[in-house]
Image (cartoon, rainbow, N blue to C red):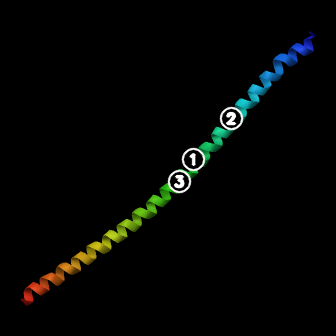
């Protein structure tokens, strides 16, 4: 076995492993970025839902106040 064959026998698998590690690292980084974007989107949706819920809660309270006033008027008329 010549020196060139020895270098190839050791070097090619080592190079393949190093390239694999690099590709895996890039994929993990990309997945992390995508997860961060999805989390941001989810937070925005949650904020929107919270705003809508607060609006609906305010309307329910407003209707409750109106009904309370109507009930009081009816009680005074009797």
Q: Is residue 78 left or right of residue 8?
A: left
Q: Which mark is residue 35?
A: 1
Picture layout, residue 35 above or below residue 78: above
Mark 1 closeness class: few <14, some 14–19, many ≥20 residues within 10 Å = few
Which residue in the structure is indicated by mark 2? 24
Query: Extreme left residue here?
Result: 78
- Give percent across and percent down for residue 60: 29, 73
Q: CA distance from mark 2 to mark 1?
A: 16 Å
Of all residues shown, which one is farthest toward the top? 1
Q: Describe the element under mark 3 as helix, strand or loop.
A: helix
Q: Residues within 10 Å of mark 2 (few under 14, many from 20)?
A: few
Give the mark toward the camera: 1 or 3. Answer: 1
Give the percent coordinates (x, y) of residue 17.
Answer: 74, 26
Residue at 31% x, 71% y is: 58
Quarter of the image with the C terminus in it: bottom left
Q: Nearer the viewer, residue 55 or 8?
A: 8
Q: Quadrant of residue 10?
A: top right
Res 40 label: 3
Q: Earlier in the sequence, mark 1 or mark 3?
A: 1
The secondary structure type at the circle numbered 2 is: helix
């Amino acid at each position: 076995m010549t020196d060139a064959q020895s270098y190839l026998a050791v070097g090619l698998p080592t190079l393949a492993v190093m390239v694999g590690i690099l590709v895996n690292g890039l994929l993990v980084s990309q997945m992390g970025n995508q997860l961060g974007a999805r989390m941001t989107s989810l937070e925005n949706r949650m904020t929107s839902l919270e705003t809508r819920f607060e609006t609906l809660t305010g309307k329910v309270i407003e209707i409750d106040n109106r009904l309370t006033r109507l009930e009081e008027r009816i009680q005074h008329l009797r």
